[in-house]
Image (tube, rainbow, N blue to C red):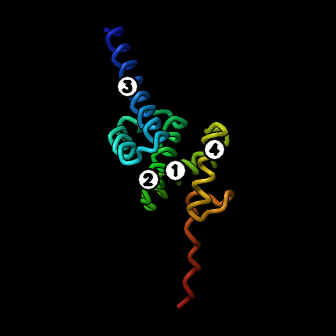
């Protein structure tokens, strides 16, 4: 029984990796609409990946949306990747980190700017 469960988990994990690799390859081939569809389809499985693998998924999904001109979706996904990189500077290799920073700058942000700024403090209400 354990062998069957282990094989099932291995196949599921490799299937997701394959789907992510296929989507990244499609992005690299500049087939952005197809890549976007592949990333959307892989999202439920991608959410089960380790934090570094999901950060890479988020980066390439964001880059895909940026290439398609979908600023809102690009901001969400590139923002998640940037937040991951801010927490762990080694989450991306040099090439992916360069792509992240280039996308971040092209969206009008500075490299040191955090992904999601803290909400502004609300001043206390004046006494009645």
Q: Which of labels 2 and 1 is toward the front?
A: 2
Which badge, 1 or 4, is on the more N-terminal residue? 1
Q: Which of labels 1 and 3 is toward the front?
A: 3
The image quadrant that residue 7 belongs to is top left
Write down the residue under mark 2: 65
Helix, strand or loop at label 2? It is: helix
Q: Badges 4 and 3: C-beta atoms under 8 Å apart? A: no
Which badge, 2 or 1, is on the more N-terminal residue? 2
Q: Badges 1 and 3: C-beta atoms under 8 Å apart? A: no
Write down the residue under mark 4: 97
Q: Which of labels 2 and 3 is toward the front?
A: 2
Please tell me which residue is depicted at 40% across the width and 18% down the height of the picture: 10
What separation in Å lies between label 4 and label 3 (alpha carbons)? 25 Å
Which badge, 4 or 3, is on the more N-terminal residue? 3
What separation in Å lies between label 1 and label 4 (alpha carbons)? 13 Å
The quadrant of the picture occupied by the N terminus is top left
What separation in Å lies between label 1 and label 3 (alpha carbons)? 23 Å
Residue 81 in view in this figure: yes
How many neighbours does mark 3 have within 10 angstroms: few (below 14), some (14-19), or many (20 or more)? some
Q: Badges 1 and 4: C-beta atoms under 8 Å apart? A: no
Residue 48 in view in this figure: no
Q: Which mark is residue 80?
A: 1
Number of labels in the image equals: 4
Write down the residue under mark 3: 15
Expressed as whole percent of the image width and height from the top left, the position of residue 32 reads 41, 47
Which badge, 1 or 3, is on the more N-terminal residue? 3
Helix, strand or loop at label 1? It is: helix
């Amino acid at each position: 029984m354990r062998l069957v469960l282990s094989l099932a988990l291995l196949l599921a994990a490799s299937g997701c990796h394959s789907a992510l690799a296929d989507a990244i390859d499609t992005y690299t081939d500049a087939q952005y609409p197809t890549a976007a569809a592949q990333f959307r389809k892989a999202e439920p499985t991608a959410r089960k990946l380790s934090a570094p693998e999901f950060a890479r998924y988020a980066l390439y999904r964001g880059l895909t949306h940026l290439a398609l001109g979908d600023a809102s979706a690009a901001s969400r996904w590139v923002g998640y990747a940037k937040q991951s990189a801010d927490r762990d500077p080694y989450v991306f290799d040099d090439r992916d980190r360069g792509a992240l920073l280039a996308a971040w700058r092209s969206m009008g942000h500075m490299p040191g700017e955090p992904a999601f700024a803290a909400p502004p403090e609300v001043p206390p209400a004046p006494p009645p």
